[in-house]
Structures are given as C-alpha cells and as structure tokens.
Amino acid sequence: MQTLVLATTNRHKVEEIRRALVGFNVLPRPESLGSVPETEETFEGNALLKAIAVSKGVTAIALADDSGVVVPALDGAPGVHSARFAGEDATDLDNVEKLLRLMDGVLDRSAYFVCVLVLCRPDGKWISFEGKVEGRLSMDAVGTNGFGYDSIFVPSDGDGRSFGEFSMDEKNLMSHRAVAIRKMVEFINSPEGLEFFHL
C-alpha cells in the first residue's frame, strides 16, 4: 500500500482526499511541521512550496493541494487568494459574502474551480496534476454541505444544484479535486508512477 503524507491541515480537504484515495495509506501532516507561507502567484507554485516542505520534513512522499475559485469577470479573483479573500483570518462565510458583494450587478457570473495536486519526493523530484470544473456563481448561498465557495458554485455539468447541496460522494464524482485525483491515481498505477514511488 502506497503511503502519502498530506501537506494540508484543512479537515474538509483531508476527508475528501482520503475518501477518494481508497487503497492508499493517507497520513495527516505532523503537527510538528509549521505552516508554509503561500507566496507564489499560481496554484501549482503554492502546492509545490507545501509539498517540498512536508516531504523534506517527514522524509516521505508528500501530497500537497492548492485550489480556489476563478472568476473571469473579476480578472481571475479570488484565484490563489481564495482562502484569504476577505482577510488573513477570514471564514468561509466572510469570503463568500465578499465575493457575492463584488458580483452584485455583474451579468457574467461564469466561474471555475481549479485544484492542483503535487506529489513530491524527499529528493525533490515532483509531479503535478490539475483538475478543473466549469460553472457559475449563484445569486445567493444555497446548501450547507461542502466548504469554501461550494454554496455559491453551480457546476455546468450538474443538475442545477450548488456544490453545497451535493453529498460528499456526489461531489467526489465531479469536483475539481476529484478530477485531479483521478489523474494522479492513473499516474501512480502506471510504470512511471511505480518508479516515482520507488525510493
């Protein structure tokens, strides 16, 4: 069984990843490892910073995630700043309310979620996987499931409900993180993946 140490401490992300990675030994980030400043301007860049720090700290393969919602009408915001959109200590509700305020009166409500996963070995070798799901922002928050911006994101390939109305199993079939995870699992099960995990 392959072991992965997660770089994230977001319990929602941990649960999503664990449920999706059946057959993997998924370990949480040790509390002894401090947080990693996310100073890059891309999802991949921030995920890589976290993956490198954790893989070196635990001397094992680390899995890091960076994700967010991108709104073309807002020049790509919140983007990599999604988690702290309304400030350093912002709650999900704070971020959602700020985004809805900025979208007041905006006709183009198209948006998409992006997730980049990075696997990194202690020797610095790494590979990334990107998942993306298109959708639009609703006028109001609907649904209490999920986290982040789920309550105001309506996926284009869905049935008109927001991600906040999806069960976790439903979301894991089509979310941006699920798409990235499927790509990663395909890699892990390939000859290249087996070589990557051969430390």
Image (cartoon, grey):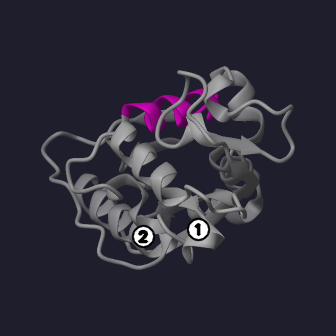
Q: Is 68 on the left or on the right of 40, as rendered?
A: right
Question: Which residue is nearer to you in this view: 159 or 27?
Answer: 159
Name the residue that disc number 2 marks: 48
Q: Mark 1 points at which residue?
A: 128
Residue drawn 17% across and 39% down? 31
Above or below for 106 versus 21: below
- In the rendered image, residue 78, in percent from the top left (x then y), is placed at 47, 64
Give the residue at x 59% y 68%: 128
Amino acid type, residue under disc 2 in the picture: Leu
Circle 2 crowding by C-alpha within 10 Å: few under 14, some 14–19, many from 20 = many
Query: Which quadrant of the figure contains the N terminus?
Result: top right
Alpha carbon of mark 1 to alpha carbon of mark 2: how far? Answer: 8 Å
Percent across and percent down for residue 62 are 41, 54
Say whether residue 154 is visible: yes
Residue 113 on the magenta span: no
Quadrant in the picture for residue 23: top right
- Number of numbered discs present? 2
- Secondary structure that dominates the magenta span: helix
Residue 179: numbered disc: none
Q: Which residue is drawn at 71% across and 58% down?
A: 132
In the visual, does 67 lie left or right of 49? right
Left or right of 45 on screen, residue 72: right
In the rendered image, residue 122, in percent from the top left (x then y), is placed at: 36, 65
Q: Residue at x 70, y 23 (%)?
A: 169
Amino acid type of the residue that numbered disc 1 sits on in the rendered structure:
Ser
Q: What stretch is highlighted in magenta?
A: 11-24
Residues at circles 1 and 2 in contact by the CB criterion of under 8 Å: yes
Depth check: give the residue in front, 25 or 135. 135
**Secondary element type, mark 1:** strand
Q: In which quarter of the image is residue 49?
A: bottom left
Q: Position of residue 175 (x, y in %)?
A: 69, 43
